[in-house]
Amino acid sequence: MIVFTEEEKAYFMSQALAEAEKSLEKDEIPIGCVIVKDKKIIGRGHNAREELNLAVMHAEVMAINQANQFLESWRLLDCTLFVTIEPCVMCSGAIGLARIPQVIYGAKNQKFGGAGSLYDILTDERLNHRVSVEVGILEESCASIMQEFFKQRRKKQKEAKKKPAV
């Protein structure tokens, strides 16, 4: 396991939050991710499902693809994935398949979480690859960007219902 200081964890999570902002600018669910090797970012990602019309284009998948290309390998050994929100089941599976040994995420995802909330794929002993997981780095910031996004989305939906049909 790679050891990071609290300051390093906060820095890399802030970089993941910057990626989440990219999603927010495109009216996507604001989740961001960075992959770090030797304390350098080698992969970045943000949700882009709506923009690219690809169901699998989650922040983690985008960052994994970029890191794979950077290392010219499907194995992301000695890497750490920082993501603002707990990975879903699909992304947890991709993390395991990429052999990423360590995941640090900001806030839990009670509705779709695959890394501790609903499911615990990353540490399931029945699987051949297990991942060290840490939760709560910049948790408040990671949770609030999501909460604000969904608050605004509900507000837009409510306003749309009030408008008369043309």
Image (spheres, grey):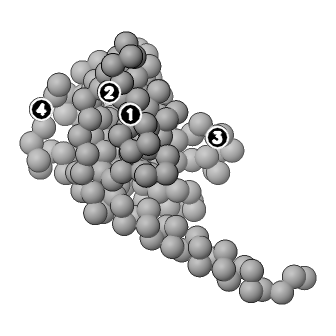
On the question of residue 126 being in view, the answer is yes
Who comes first in sequence, dot 4 or dot 3? 4
- The residue that disc 3 covers is 55
Who comes first in sequence, dot 2 or dot 3? 3
Residue 116 pos. (x, y %):
35, 40
Say which element carries label 1.
loop
Q: Residue at x 66, y 80 (%)?
A: 158
> Disc 3 residue type?
Ala
Label 1–label 2 contact, CB within 8 A: yes
- The residue that disc 4 covers is 3
User: Label 1 vs label 3: CA separation?
Assistant: 22 Å
Say which element carries label 2.
helix
Residue depth check, mark 2 versus mark 3: number of the one nearer the observer: 2
Image: 126 above or below 60: above
Disc number placed over residue 120 in the picture, else none: 1
Who comes first in sequence, dot 1 or dot 4? 4
Residue depth check, mark 1 versus mark 4: number of the one nearer the observer: 1
Most distant residue in the left direction: 5
Residue 133 pos. (x, y %):
26, 35
- The residue that disc 2 covers is 123
Q: Residue at x 51, y 73 (%)?
A: 151
Who comes first in sequence, dot 4 or dot 2? 4
Say which element carries label 3.
loop
User: Label 2 vs label 3: CA separation?
Assistant: 25 Å
- The image quarter in which residue 117 lies: top left
Who comes first in sequence, dot 1 or dot 3? 3
Say which element carries label 4.
loop
